[in-house]
Image (spheres, helix red, strand yellow):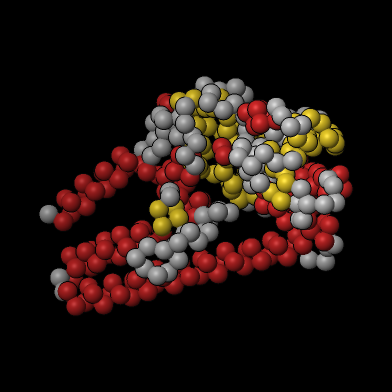
Amino acid sequence: MLNKALCILLFVFCLLCSVSFANDIVVPFTSVPNQPYFQSAQLMVDSVENNTIILTLKSDQNGTARLFWANHYDPQFNQPKSLWFFVKSGIHDYYFNVPSQNPNWIGWTKALLIYPEFDPAGLEIKYAKIVPSSLSTNIASGWQEFWGPNGRVVVGSTINVTPASTIFGQPINIYAYWLTGIFFLLILTWQRNYLRAGKLTIYFSLGVWILLGLSTYHNNFGILKDNFDKYFGKSIEIKRAIAYGKDYYDFLVFVRNKLPKKPVSFSILSSRYAPELQSRIFLVPHILVDPAKDNPEYLLIFNPEPKQLELTKKYCPYAKLNQNAYILTRTK
């Protein structure tokens, strides 16, 4: 009876792991001239039916990269529609069950973009495709997500007081509870002894939490090493340029030199991820306010999205760094 049950489970597992290669959508990428990224050809992909991206990359170094997509709701490549991931040296496959990591995988996907945070000359996109998800691709994506740049970021706790990382939007503690329960049932079925099964389950639970603890230490060491290599021995200006991005840091320096010396209120309109964080600190004593509610005296414009420019109607030019980076002042 047990053997029949195991055979049925194995058969179901194989079905869940199977991938329908007939539905695969091959995505050609090209290097964009004079730009540090790779962009796909134009696509028309139903994001509901095709939710997993598989990349085969060849890299001559380790580093982080970012995957962007554009859809018919928002044809721009921007931070809300992106994922971070680690790139390892050599040739490796990378799996992304996108909607499990970002809710903005919706509608019709129009194009993809890969932006490496290192010299793009050392990266080659050997193959790329978009496929429907399966159990095997979900497992590969979840494993990669957990060990990726954001996978082990602590986001809170479940009923266990141990802080939890996430996979597919769920605290990893939940997976540990399920594994522990399954382990107990398997041992109980095999041993038919509650005391023995309970003892082994306790040992199993301790092993799981030790592994999760080691994962946290591994993550913290990686952050320490990365920041040490980036910032140690460098001047404060170079550190800020690295942390902010040199183009954005140059813009903030420009703004600080151009704004009045007395404190003024300002807002920033940008497609950049969280531009307010650096400006709030760097431009003190000037005061960051909400552009839609507080009628700021100055607007800082840095690579804006088209819809953001609707807030500039009551403003006129004040100072310009370039066509995508400038300051506006209130007219009334």
Q: Is residue 285 left or right of residue 88?
A: right
Which residue appears at 42% of the width and 69% of the height? 162
Please count the marks in the image. Answer: 0
As displayed, is residue 166 above or below residue 128?
below
Which residue appears at 21% of the width and 46% of the height? 8
* Residue 152 x/y as whole percent: 51, 59
Q: Nearer the viewer, residue 260 or 125?
A: 260
- As drawn, the residue found furthest toward the right would be 257
Q: Is residue 290 visible?
A: yes
Q: Nearer the viewer, residue 154 or 298?
A: 298
Q: Quadrant of residue 230?
A: bottom right
As displayed, is residue 200 above or below residue 127?
below
Q: Is residue 96 left or right of residue 291?
A: left
* Residue 54 x/y as whole percent: 52, 38
Q: Quadrant of the N terminus?
A: bottom left
Q: Quadrant of residue 157?
A: bottom left
- As drawn, the residue found furthest toward the left would be 1
Q: Quadrant of the C terminus?
A: top right
Q: Nearer the viewer, residue 195 or 162?
A: 162
Which residue appears at 64% of the width and 42% of the height? 294
* Residue 91 x/y as whole percent: 62, 45
* Residue 212 x/y as whole percent: 46, 67
Q: Quadrant of residue 211?
A: bottom left
Q: Is residue 36 visible?
A: no
Which residue appears at 60% of the width and 40% of the height? 293
